[in-house]
Image (cartoon, rainbow, N blue to C red):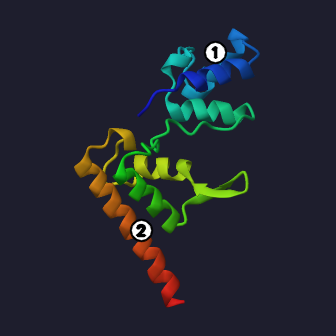
Amino acid sequence: MTTATKDQKLAIRRNCGFNEEVKCELVQWVKNDNAQTSLNSLTFDEANKILEAQGDKPHKGKKWANFNKTNPKHKVILSLLYQAQWTTNYNGREVPDLDRFSEWLQDKAPVKKPLMKQEPKELEKTIYALTQIVKGIWKKVTKN
């Protein structure tokens, strides 16, 4: 269970107008405990729950999908993201959807580590898993 990020805590304070009493009430509400008043006690999900209650967007967490453009294995992964159609439109161009890939790395990938921290053997496992996703997509396309 990850703790609330610095950005989440700042956003909560800003949304409260830096009013300490309002902030304490929100923490007590989400924790369901009147003794808890510190933002430091919040989990990532609890902080997002407060942000959503304040009408703000939930935070997505750390970016696990940062790439090294000189690493050949990272280039293969970028190619697989295009082949899997994990893309989004940015300034009129189709680019890899790094938020989706980051979430996949955190939740469903065989190696649950940020891309930049993966060793060569771990990158091979990630590449294999993405290859299987691409194969599954193209099997569906060719059946129809």
Q: Is residue 62 left or right of residue 120?
A: right
Q: 95 or 48: which is nearer to us?
A: 95
Q: What numbered label is drawn on residue 24?
A: 1
Residues 54 and 21: in front is: 54
Quadrant showing the N terminus: top left
Q: Is residue 121 above or below residue 10?
A: below
Residue 142, above or below 35: below
Q: Secondary structure at mark 1?
A: helix
Q: Position of residue 15 (x, y in %)?
A: 74, 23
Residue 63 visible to an observer of this rendering:
yes
| Image coords of residue 43 (percent x, y) | 49, 29
User: Which residue is nearer to you in this view: 102 or 66?
Assistant: 66
Q: Is residue 33 above or below residue 87?
A: above
- Looking at the image, the residue that sits furthest to the left is 121
Q: Is residue 114 visible?
A: no
Residue denoted by label 2: 133
Name the spot of residue 89 as percent of width and height, x first: 68, 56
Amino acid tagged 2: Ile
Circle 1 residues within 10 Å: few <14, some 14–19, many ≥20? some
Q: Secondary structure at mark 2?
A: helix
Task: Tell us which disc is closer to us: 2 or 1.
Answer: 2
